[in-house]
Amino acid sequence: MFYRFAKVLVRFYLRVLFRIEVSGTVPQTGGCLICANHTSYYDPVVVAAFCGRQLTFMAKEELFSHPLFGRLIKSLGAFPVNRDANGFGAVKTALAILKQQKATVIFPEGKRNRTGDKIAPKAGAVMIAHRAGVPIVPVGICGSFKPFSKLKITYGAPITYEGYGEKKLDGETMDLLADQLMDRILMLAEEKA
């Protein structure tokens, strides 16, 4: 209930602040991983506000250290990841969420990328999607986040890894697939409104 209320409020705020254009959609049922480029603090909010279903988020652990803000983002579906450790707890949480047929958001760059240039993505999203047997929906966010500027959110076609079977992917394969995923996300982000 709180999530839906917050989503309506945030969507109204974003439409007032920016000229929003949305294209594409995400699967409305079943587990899926949503992966977007990450240039601004607005990105998680933007992805969730214009997605047709409720989302959960992998967020850096430091955000939960602020008592009020930590409680707020937790109530909106965020769960912590320690970026300096192996992140096993966050992976386990993400797999459990996907097993419940829910959708979760991961930013493959692992941190905000202020330049928008390609940086080596983390392979975690590919590994989680493969292990959970769910598709990844690539999302490109294009815009400057300056008030009243145009902002385009493009939800791309789902990517699946069914062709790799159930065997564990080796590091080289995961890195290659993560790189291809990031290329697709950046291509969607470059599509002008």
Image (tube, rainbow, N blue to C red):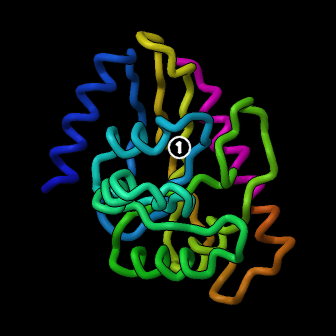
Residue extending farthest bottom: 167
Q: Position of residue 81 (x, y in %)?
A: 57, 68
Query: Is residue 153 magenta-colored?
Result: no
Quarter of the image holding residue 136? bottom right
Q: Is residue 29 left or right of residue 126?
A: left
The kind of residue on which mark 1 rests is Val
Characterize the local packing of mark 1: few (<14), some (14-19) or many (20 or more) Cα atoms within 10 angstroms. Answer: many
Residue extending farthest right: 172
Residue bearing mark 1: 139
Query: Is residue 189 magenta-colored?
Result: yes
Quarter of the image holding residue 192? top right
Residue extending farthest top: 148
What residue is shown at x 86% (from left), y 71% (from top)?
Answer: 172
Along the line of sight, the residue nearer the viewer: 72 or 93: 72
Q: Position of residue 44 (x, y in %)?
A: 45, 45
Secondary element at tag 1: strand
Magenta stretch bounds: 178-193
What residue is shown at x 49% (from left), y 71% (from top)?
Answer: 134
Q: Position of residue 109 (x, y in %)?
A: 69, 51
Residue extending farthest left: 1
Along the line of sight, the residue nearer the viewer: 25 or 128: 128
Asked if 110 appears above or below 119 in the picture, the reply is below
